[in-house]
Image (spheres, helix red, strand yellow):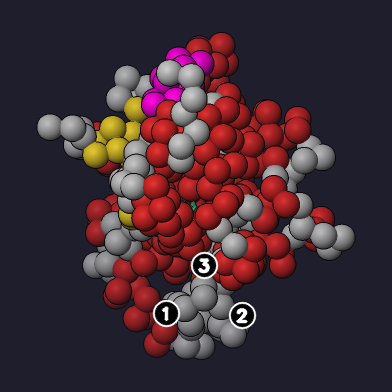
Amino acid sequence: MKKEIILTGERPTGSLHIGHYAGALQNRIAMQNSNRFETFVIIADAQALTDNAENPDKVRENVLQVTLDNLAVGIDPEKSTIFIQSAVPELTELAFYYQNLVTVARLQRNPTVKSEIAQKERFRGGTPVGFFTYPISQAADITAFDAGIVPVGEDQMPMIEQTQEIVQKFNSLYGKTLVMPKGVIPENTAARRLPGIDGNAKMGKSLNNTINLGDSADIIAAKIKTMYTDPLHLCIEDPGHTENNPVFQYLMAFATPEHFTAFLPEYKDYAELAAHYERGGLGDVKVKKFLNEVIQEILCPIRKRREQLERDPNAIMEILHKGTIKARERAAVTVARVKKAMKLEYFV
Ligand code: ATP
Ligand code: MG
């Protein structure tokens, strides 16, 4: 039976962080290892340029970093195809055709694009067309591989909806050509949108509020020590708030009952710990110490693997090269199908 296809990936705008791990990578690895799917991992360098046009060096350097992160968490090039977006020009071609199927008003309503534009100082003088239309380019990335499943964090769900509308419109105008994708977000609600260490609603590479997968043990400890918590929880006895408190949201996303047994046996699980904090009588220092132990335990093996892989950048480029050749072949098949459906097939 033909395996269902997954398309997933990141923009090479910085090293990957625990928000990616919670929101997308964990799911991605589990799905890859289930052997029930065929996985394509896109390193979306062209999309990264839509808000980094003046900084091509940053994007280029991070292609390697993001690939290392993916391999370090367990993406296996024997099982998954990892590739570079800009080296698959078929994706640009598809995006060009899909532009006819989306209105300016619809893009303006996209809540993720709206909030990202509002956050970006560099767009004060105007938003680049490329950034404004990146949901269309994302629809091209997804449909080019006939992906039915797209594991993402919550911020990306509006993009999936936009892709679904494009697929619907394309298929109704030109006949059933494209596969309808579905977004998969984590079951754990805290993992869907991990907040930043500064209390910002989202940890984001471009927001300087991350704990990176490659951070050293000392850096992780220092970041957790200075992390934002409940500003109203001044004395240990004060009742605390776990909502909008990143320390608790991280614990909800990552702490398992095994972590409690190993590092904080006075509590059975997250619910017991959170209840004590909310009642009052539990200090931030103790909770942060536990969080540090949990995050260190998760990131230590990833960091070690990353350090090993980092020693041979040529091998990483070779993995990307092979993956890109395969991705191009697959995308070309879709482009041919799309052009035929749109009556753009001339010289066969
Ligand atoms: P940038 O700030 O450059 O947009 P980013 O941190 O948002 O970077 P992306 O490469 O845009 O990272 O996102 C890749 C994937 O990781 C997407 O599926 C996204 O939903 C998910 N993701 C990113 N940040 C988080 C987060 N804080 N919590 C959960 N999922 C996240
Ligand atoms: Mg993003």
Which amino acid type corresponds to the residue marked 1 in the rendered image? Tyr
- Secondary structure type for disc 3: helix
Question: Is 35 in front, or is 240?
Answer: 35
The vertical placement of 324 against 191, above or below, is above
Badge 1: how crowded within 10 Å, few (<14), some, or many (20+)? many
Q: In which quadrant is the C terminus drawn?
A: top left
Residue 326: which disc?
Answer: none
> Mark 1 and mark 2: span between their CA atoms?
13 Å
The vertical placement of 154 against 100, above or below, is below
The vertical placement of 270 against 160, above or below, is below
Circle 3 residue: 246
What x and y, as percent, mark residue 32? 28, 35
Task: Please say if the residues under marks 3 and 1 sit with CB atoms less than 8 Å apart.
Answer: no
Which amino acid type corresponds to the residue marked 3 in the rendered image? Pro
Question: Is 104 in front, or is 59?
Answer: 104
Question: Is 156 in front, or is 176?
Answer: 176
Looking at the image, the residue that sits furthest to the right is 125
Q: Main secondary structure of the magenta part?
A: helix
Circle 1 residue: 277
What x and y, as percent, mark residue 225? 59, 59
Q: Is mark 3 within 8 Å of ligand 1?
A: no
In this orientation, does residue 234 appear?
yes
Mark toward the start of the polypeptide (3 vs 1)? 3
Q: In which quadrant is the N terminus drawn?
A: top left
* Disc number lying in front (3 or 1): 3
Circle 2 residue: 231
Q: Does the residue labelled 1 lie within 8 Å of ligand 1?
A: no
What x and y, as percent, mark residue 109? 59, 70
Span shown in magenta? 321-333
What x and y, as percent, mark residue 167? 40, 52
Which amino acid type corresponds to the residue marked 2 in the rendered image? Pro
Task: Please say if the residues under marks 3 and 2 sit with CB atoms less than 8 Å apart.
Answer: no
